[in-house]
Image (cartoon, grey):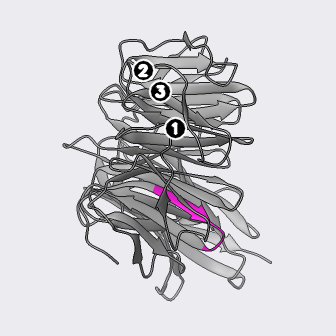
Amino acid sequence: GFRISKVYALAYSLTSLLSGADKSGIFLSTNSGDNWSVTYSGVPDTVRAFTISGTNLFAGNDYNSVCKSTDNGLHWYAVNNGLFSYHFYSLITSGTNIFGGSNYGVFLTSNNGTNWTSKGLTNNFVYALEVSGSNLFAGTNNGIFLSTNNGTNWTAIGLTNLNIRALIFSGTNLFAGTDGNGVYISSNYGTNWISTGLTNQNVASFAVSGANLFAGTSTSSEGGVYLSTNNGVSWIAKNQGFRTIPAVYSLLTVNNYLFAGTGNQSVWRRSITEIIGIQKTGTEIPSSFSLSQNYPNPFNPTTVIRFSLSVVSNTSLKVYEITGHEVQSLVNERLQPGTYEVTFDGSELTSGVYFYKLTTDGFTETKKMILIK
C-alpha cells in the first residue's frame, strides 16, 4: 500500500490500476491494489482525473495540466501545448476527441494531446464531464451545461445554483453529484432534474455496476460510500470495513471489485457481489423490529430473507448449520430504519436444515430454513 492524504482519481487499463493522489503524483498496481509503485513523481503534483483513449492514458493535474502515458502508466510526460498552468479536474474520451475540464473551462484535443484548444465555459470551474452520443455534459460550479457540437456552443440545463462535482449515466438516467445538496437525476438528458437523496452530502464521485449506482461522499460528519439499487429512490451506506468512515473522492468498478479513493486512508476495495447483497425495499419506517420467514422454503439453491428495523441499529444476519457452525455472514453493518431483503445462495451446501439469526441493538431472532436438492 501507500500513505497519501487524498486519492482524487482512479482508472484501470489492461492490467494496471492507477490512482491519482494529492501532491504525490500517480501510483500503479498490477495486482488489484495489493502493491503499489509510484510512476509519476517529477513534481509534487496533484492528479485529479484520468481517461483512456486506445493505448494512450491521460492524467489531469495541477502542475502540468495534462500528462500522457503510452506504456500503460509506467512513464508519463506533459502534453500541454495550448494550455497554461491550469488545474484539470476532469477528463473524458468521446471517439477520437478528448475533453478536459479545468479551472478555465473546457479544452479539447483531437490528436491525442499534441494540441489543445479552448472550448468555452471559461468563467467556470469544470469539475465533471460526461458524454452520451453527441451530447457532452459539463458539471461546473454554476450548474450543468450541455453541448451537442463538441463544445462549440453551450446551453445551461439546470441546477444553476449548485456546485456539480460528479456526473454519470446509468442506463439512460443522468446523475449529478453536488456539493452539499446530494444527488439529482434526469431521465431526459438534463431537461428536468429531481432530487434523489443524500441531500446533506457532498457527493464527489460515482460508479456504476449493472443496475447498482455507487456514490462517494465527502461530508466531514459522515462521508463514505452509498449504494442505490433503484435509481436513487433510496440509498444504503456501505462502509463496513473502513477503520473510520472516510471522505471518498473517487470510485471505480473493475473485476468485481469496487475501489474507493479516500481522503485520508489511501485506496480501499470491496467485492461488488458482497456489497450489493442487501437491498432496501420501500421507504416506510417499520413500527418494530422483525425477521420474516425465508421464501421460498424449502429452497434450492437460493432464498430471500426479509427483516425490518424500526431505528438505526448495528445489524448482523448470519446463517448456521444445525450443529451451530456459522455458514455465512449475510449482513454486518450499521443500517438505517427500514425493511431489507437479502438473497442467500446455498448452491455450495448440502441438503438439510439451516438456521438464520438476526441480531440488532436490542432485538434477536432465529428462524429455520430447509435446503432440498
Q: Which numbered circle lies on residue 8?
A: none
Range shown magenta: 10-15
* Of 343 and 291, the residue lying toward us: 343
Q: Which numbered circle lies on residue 100?
A: 1
Q: Is residue 248 above or below residue 90?
A: below
Q: Position of residue 256 (x, y in %)?
A: 61, 66
Q: Secondary structure at mark 2?
A: loop
* Of 275 and 103, the residue lying toward us: 103
Q: Which numbered circle lies on residue 139?
A: 3
The reply to whether dot 3 and dot 1 touch (C-beta < 8 Å) is: no
From the viewer's perspective, tell me whether residue 54 is left or right of residue 309.
right
From the viewer's perspective, tell me whether residue 135 is left or right of residue 77.
right
Q: Residue furthest right?
A: 373
Q: Amino acid at mark 3?
A: Gly
Badge 2 is on which residue? 122
- Alpha carbon of mark 2 to alpha carbon of mark 3: how far? 13 Å
Q: Position of residue 114 (x, y in %)?
A: 60, 47
From the viewer's perspective, tell me whether residue 223 is left or right of residue 320.
left
